[in-house]
Amino acid sequence: MITGLLIVIVVLEIIRFVIYIQDSKRIRITNKLAGEQQARAVEFAKKQNADWKKIRALEIKELKQLAKESDTMKQIYDEWVEANKKPSPSGVEE
């Protein structure tokens, strides 16, 4: 009787151990896949960020060029200069 119970306990422990090993394998595979996916996501984000920075730099460069060439911008600047001129103490403009 006791021998039979010991055999049942040993068989159940072996089954539990096999299930534990299978679970461990599955978890390692899942973690490996998750790590690879995360690495791909990081690389993609870096590439997107670099592309965005290049596009933004080109936009800023283009806007600066347009501002230099724009008559309206020159007019606004000239008006601003005129408005911010300080009167000289002698009353004569500089």
Image (spheres, grey):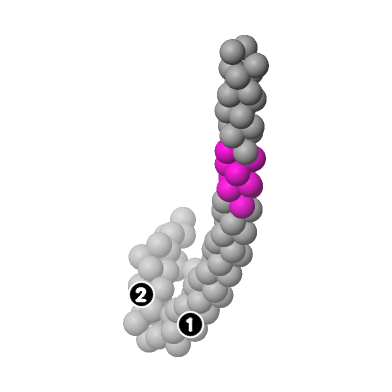
Q: Is residue 1 magenta?
A: no
**Above-or-below relation of 49 to 63:** above
Q: Is residue 27 magenta?
A: yes
Give 93 or 46, whichever is nearer the viewer: 46
Percent coordinates x, y for residue 48 in the rendering: 53, 69
* Amino acid at pointer 1: Glu
Percent coordinates x, y for residue 71 in the rendering: 38, 86
Number of numbered discs on residues: 2
**Above-or-below relation of 5 to 43:** above
Give 85 or 12, whichever is nearer the viewer: 12
What whole-number distance in Å separates the C-alpha atoms at marks 2 and 1?
A: 19 Å
| The label number, if any, that marks residue 62 in the structure image | 1
Query: The N terminus is located in which quarter?
Result: top right
- Label 1 neighbourhood size at 10 Å, few (<14), some (14-19), many (20+)? few
Give 28 or 60, whichever is nearer the viewer: 28
Q: Quadrant of residue 36?
A: bottom right
**Above-or-below relation of 34 to 71:** above
Residue drawn where x is 36% and y is 75% of the image: 76
Q: Earlier in the sequence, mark 2 or mark 1?
A: 1
Label 2 element class: helix
Q: Give the range drawn in magenta.
A: 19-29
Residue drawn where x is 48% and y is 82% of the image: 62
Label 1 element class: helix
| The label number, if any, that marks residue 76 in the structure image | 2
Direction top: furthest residue: 2
* Amino acid at pointer 2: Ile
Percent coordinates x, y for residue 38 in the rendering: 57, 56
Residue drawn where x is 60% and y is 19% of the image: 4
Q: Left of 22 or right of it: where is 84?
A: left
